[in-house]
Amino acid sequence: MNKSNQERCIQCRLIIQDCICSENSAFWAEHKITLLTSKREERIISNTGRLLRLVLENISPVYIGKKGWEKEVESEIMRTDYTPVILFPTPPVCDGQIIMEETGKPLNIFVLDTSWRNARRWLHKPVLMNLKKIGLKTVPPSEYYLRKQSAENYLCTFQAVTLLMAELRTKGFASVSFQINEKFTLWVKSLARERGLKITTTPS
């Protein structure tokens, strides 16, 4: 039987024998993730935003294009228990750690879970334009081999968010980061095998 036709886990979307959901314990982070995505993106098996929702608890999706999505974003921005920011790698960017020190609050991090071309377009939607933009201080090589990235310093949603959590020194994250990243590695390898891709761990 072709692997693409085999039964899949409804959560991680891997074929059943490769499912990584057993003993899955999601981590509750002090920072909230507001995942800006679309129904089309969510249906893609290799979408890493959906995987991120399996390993983090303090995360909620907003579907761009769905009726009322702007109101949902506005509600998140207006929350008084977090400082809203948007994650995007292009300069100029603010330092998330400094923002936290200045406001005394954890962050509500808006993350654009889509292709890079769509992300650039979404970034300029009026409801998002006044958000402070933060980025990663250090960008390692991508470990996501399932889609071609448009630039070397562009990472998938999962890797960008987990690296940011580490850089922000998120409480308790250091103790679970290995397990979280291990799930990601297993997930990528499983999908790569399905596609007959050879994973290379060093830059060519």
Image: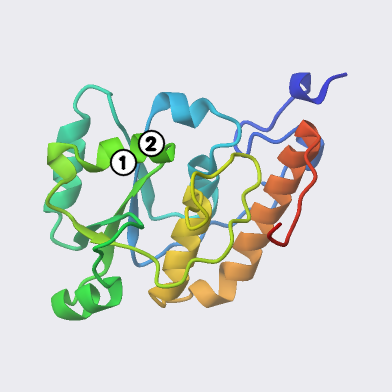
197 shown above or below 8 = below
The percent coordinates of residue 53 (x first, y second) are 48, 47
| Res 117 label | 2
Q: Is 198 situated above or below 99?
A: above
Residue 109 sits in which quadrant? bottom left
Q: Amino acid at mark 2?
A: Arg
Apparent side of residue 129 relative to residue 137 in the rendered image (left or right): left
Q: Amino acid at mark 1?
A: Arg
* Position of residue 120 measured from the top left corner of the image (x, y, whole percent): 31, 41
At 38% from the left and 74% from the top, the residue drawn is 168
Secondary structure beneath disc 1?
Answer: helix
Q: For the N terminus, which image quadrant?
A: top right
On the question of residue 170 being in view, the answer is no
Residue at 64%, 53% in the rendered image: 184
Circles 1 and 2: CB atoms closer than 8 Å:
yes
- Residue situated in front as seen by the camera: 92 or 28: 92
Q: Secondary structure at mark 2?
A: helix
Residue on which disc 1 sits: 120
Side of 4 relative to 78 (left or right)? right
Q: Which mark is residue 88?
A: none
The residue lying furthest to the right in this view is 1
Residue 126 in percent (x, y) is at: 12, 38
From the viewer's perspective, is residue 171 above or below residue 24? below
Left or right side of 22 for 156? left
Q: Identify the image's colour scheme: rainbow, by chain, secondary structure or one colour.
A: rainbow
Please name whichever residue, 99 or 141, is drawn nearer the observer in this view of the structure: 141
Q: At 41% across and 25% down in the image, what residue appears?
A: 39
Which picture quadrant has residue 90? bottom left
